[in-house]
């Protein structure tokens, strides 16, 4: 590390001592857990889990990005090495066919088999599990995450888990005592933490265990139909664990220090933590985050494919805005659908615009710092996403050059080369307008009161200099609304949006008119007033 980089790291560490943002609070919990000393394994281990039974979705990504934020906060506070495992439970049996994948009839024929033994319905990878793992890694890699991918199939089959599977066998009765009270009566009759893999069908079996041999490290079950006793090793990938037992065993095997999980897994965390302790481990520090909801307030599901996908978000907004959305209040439930994108982009831009002028003590609590992995950055100056969306809307733009024509007049130093982030925002704004705003646009005729106010606004704007700034324009817009005795100014602005832009919500009009141009705005008002004159 260079002297300047070392000095900057020292400055960040001092600034972070009293940081209150949630990633630093979590990092301090980890430091307290290890008593500010390097663990015997030589590093602090953070883990995220992924169930590849469906295509990766934004909730999956959210867990990784949030855990990465905690990791960066920890690295700011301490020199103790860290690692991040992203674990895929790809040996789990396929329980149902996801709604949003092809070749569903083919998949039904493989229900119950480990995901890495189910053919890929997309016909690109050696299995469905490999396909979904590849999709997850592709996205995480595109974000530049530092992580180590771990496959359940590989860990079981390579023998990496063998030692710890034997511990589960030794403590079999104690684990049953923990698990059975949490199960329905009929499930208790057949429950075992071990799930044999049938050598004939390849299926993951949920069958009662007739006997177990600790010395031989085997279990015996009765084959359905024939009644034949089948003895199988618990090691080498011949069995896997039920997932709560698997989770606790994995924490013990890897010696995980930190893992967050959704609110729906609170009880599972408690049970897995008990199992981890029974086999001699220490459960990790845990943050329980709220679940993402779709537009209707329903939980987002991989199998249903509701809510936004990762690719959909990145079609309409930059990746930084997605990371910012994930940063916000992880313990609060948030709806995740198309309407949240513009607000997330603009909030990210707002925090970025404040960053450079803040003291370091405030920068470390600025979401912009956490989104960018603790780097000291200067946000690129530019226009917000809402303004660009409305510019695209009023211009009916499908070509970035149209918007750039307005932008360069407003901000002469800007160009696709000089301001690449702004260039990306323009591209995203056009895509969002084309696919989401344009189909819903619905202009209405102004009332007589609104028509008179619009004519007055046109007259007032015509008296301004063509280079008038947003604040001066905004003051005139306000005054016109007051002069025409609208019951409330909100109704005046709603009229501007609905009559001029064909939408129910819109931008700060002063800023929009400055960007769009006073002559162009006058022409727009003329067109709408003339339509009913």
Image (cartoon, rainbow, N blue to C red):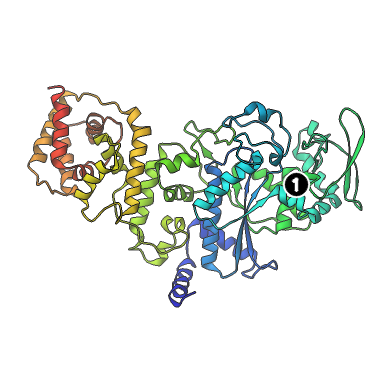
Closer to the camera in the image, 456 or 117 = 117
Give the left or right position of residue 313, taking residue 413 as reference. right
Q: State the residue at coordinates (54%, 33%).
A: 305
Q: Residue 42, image x and y in percent?
A: 66, 68
* Mark 1 crowdedness (10 Å alpha carbons): few <14, some 14-19, many ≥20: many
Give the left or right position of residue 503, taking residue 189 as reference. left
Q: Residue 397, image x and y in percent?
A: 28, 36
Give the left or right position of residue 79, taking residue 20 as reference. right
Quadrant (top left/top right/bottom left/bottom right) for the C terminus: top left
Give the left or right position of residue 321, taking residue 206 as reference. left
Residue 65 to residue 523: above or below = below
Q: State the residue at coordinates (50%, 39%).
A: 309
Quarter of the rendering containing residue 393: top left
Closer to the camera in the image, 186 or 432 = 432
Residue 203 to residue 329: above or below = above
Please, which residue is most extreme toward the left here?
Answer: 463
Please, which residue is most extreme toward the top here?
Answer: 532
Q: Residue 475, image x and y in percent?
A: 17, 44
Can residue 235 be seen here?
yes
Closer to the camera in the image, 518 or 510 = 518
What is the total number of numbered labels drawn onto the structure image? 1
Residue 503 to residue 347: above or below = above
Quarter of the rendering containing residue 120: top right
Please, which residue is most extreme toward the bottom here?
Answer: 3
Reading the image, the residue beneath label 1 is 245
Q: State the residue at coordinates (66%, 52%).
A: 150
Q: State the residue at coordinates (26%, 43%).
A: 401
Quarter of the rendering containing residue 315: top left
Closer to the camera in the image, 394 or 292 = 394
Can residue 289 be seen here?
no
Q: Residue 371, image x and y in percent?
A: 45, 55
Q: Secondary structure at mark 1?
A: helix
């Amino acid at each position: 590390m260079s002297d300047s980089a070392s000095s900057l790291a020292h400055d960040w560490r001092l600034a972070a001592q009293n940081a209150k943002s949630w990633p630093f609070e979590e990092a301090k919990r980890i430091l307290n857990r290890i008593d500010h000393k390097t663990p015997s394994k030589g590093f602090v281990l953070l883990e995220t889990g992924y169930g590849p039974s469906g295509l990766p979705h934004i909730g999956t990504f959210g867990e990784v990005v949030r855990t990465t934020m905690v990791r960066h906060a920890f690295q700011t506070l301490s020199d103790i090495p860290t690692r991040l495992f992203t674990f895929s439970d790809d040996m789990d049996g396929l329980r149902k066919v996801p709604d949003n994948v092809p070749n569903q009839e083919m998949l039904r024929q493989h229900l119950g088999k480990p995901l890495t033994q189910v053919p890929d319905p997309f016909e690109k990878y050696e299995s469905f599990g490999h396909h979904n793992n590849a999709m997850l890694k592709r996205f995480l890699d595109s974000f530049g995450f530092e992580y180590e991918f771990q496959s359940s199939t590989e860990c079981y089959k390579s023998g990496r888990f063998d030692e710890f599977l034997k511990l589960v066998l030794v403590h079999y009765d104690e684990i049953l005592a923990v698990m059975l009270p949490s199960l329905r009566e009929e499930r208790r009759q057949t429950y075992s933490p071990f799930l044999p893999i049938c050598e004939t069908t390849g299926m993951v079996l949920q069958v009662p265990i007739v006997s177990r041999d600790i010395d031989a490290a085997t279990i015996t079950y009765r084959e359905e139909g024939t009644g034949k006793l089948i003895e199988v090793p618990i090691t080498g990938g011949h069995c896997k664990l039920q997932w709560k037992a698997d989770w606790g065993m994995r924490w013990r095997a890897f010696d995980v220090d930190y893992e967050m999980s959704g609110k729906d897994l609170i009880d599972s965390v408690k049970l897995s933590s008990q199992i981890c302790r029974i086999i001699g481990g220490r459960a990790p520090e845990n943050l329980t985050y709220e679940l993402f909801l779709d537009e209707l307030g329903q939980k987002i599901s991989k199998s249903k494919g509701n809510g936004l996908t990762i690719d959909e978000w990145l079609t309409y907004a930059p990746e930084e805005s997605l990371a910012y959305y994930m940063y916000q209040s992880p313990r609060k439930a948030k709806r995740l659908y198309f309407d949240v994108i513009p607000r997330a982009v603009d909030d990210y831009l707002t925090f970025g615009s404040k960053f450079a002028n803040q003291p370091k003590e405030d920068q470390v609590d600025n979401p912009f710092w956490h989104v960018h992995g603790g780097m000291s950055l200067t946000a690129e100056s530019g226009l917000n996403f809402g303004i660009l969306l409305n510019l695209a809307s009023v211009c009916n733009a499908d070509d970035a050059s149209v918007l750039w024509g307005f932008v360069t007049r407003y901000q002469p130093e800007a160009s696709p080369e000089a301001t690449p982030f702004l260039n990306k925002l323009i591209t995203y704004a056009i895509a969002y307008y084309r696919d989401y705003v344009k189909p819903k646009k619905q202009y209405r005729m102004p009332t007589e009161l609104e028509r008179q106010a619009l004519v007055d606004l046109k007259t007032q704007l015509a008296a301004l200099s063509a280079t008038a700034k947003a604040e001066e324009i905004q003051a005139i817009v306000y005054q016109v609304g007051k002069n025409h005795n609208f019951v409330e100014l909100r109704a005046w602005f709603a009229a501007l949006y609905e009559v001029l832009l064909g939408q129910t919500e819109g931008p700060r009009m002063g800023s929009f008119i400055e960007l769009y141009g006073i002559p162009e705005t006058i022409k727009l008002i003329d067109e709408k007033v003339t339509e009913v004159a």
